[in-house]
Amino acid sequence: MSVSTIQQFLKELASSAPTPGGGSTAALSGAVGASLVSMVCQLTIGKKRYADVQTEMHEILKVSEELQQKLIAMIDEDAKAFDLVMDAFKMPKKTAEEKSARRTAIQEGSKQATIVPMKVVLACARVIELG
């Protein structure tokens, strides 16, 4: 990720746009945490001083890299899930059928918009366990 990409994310986050929001930001923070765990592993692996933890460091490195990638994917996943909710609120509501379809779409979108942040929390908790 380039500095300009980070700056763009922060600019969008600071805007009045509904996304990215808290879930995407939490996913990014978790990915940063996983990256720091990976860095510690990389600094430890191959050092004679830490010979007794080499196997463990390789295992932790593998898991931290996997979590980093999952959390990066969740940045966009969270934004897309919330966009579904916002789109549902924009649906027409003049007829009973439209109101019913809108209500269903809001409920389904809200459910998904709740599931993604929960996945982020679980992945971040796993990163914390690694550290």
Image: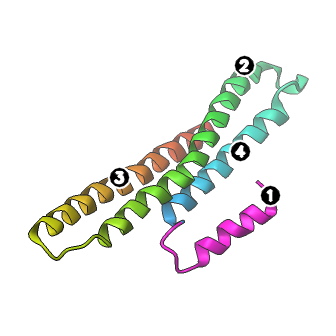
Q: Nearer the viewer, mark 2 or mark 3?
A: 3
Residue 127 in picture, x, y percent from top left: 59, 42
| Within-10-Å neighbours for mark 1: few <14, some 14–19, many 20+ | few
Q: Secondary structure at mark 3?
A: helix
Q: Earlier in the sequence, mark 1 or mark 2?
A: 1
Inter-mark Cα distance, 4 to 1: 15 Å
Q: Which mark is residue 55?
A: 2
Q: Which residue is mark 1?
A: 2
Image height of 33 relative to 129, above or below: below
Look at the image and give the residue range highlighted in magenta.
1-19
Inter-mark Cα distance, 2 to 3: 38 Å
User: Which residue sits furthest left?
Assistant: 96
Q: Nearer the viewer, residue 32 or 55?
A: 32
Q: Which mark is residue 112?
A: 3
Q: Earlier in the sequence, mark 3 or mark 1?
A: 1
Badge 4 amino acid: Ser
| Within-10-Å neighbours for mark 3: few <14, some 14–19, many 20+ | some
Q: Quadrant of residue 105 in the image? A: bottom left
Side of 104 relative to 40 (left or right): left
Q: Earlier in the sequence, mark 2 or mark 3?
A: 2
Location of the C terminus by quadrant is top right
Q: Secondary structure at mark 4?
A: helix
Q: Which residue is mark 4?
A: 35
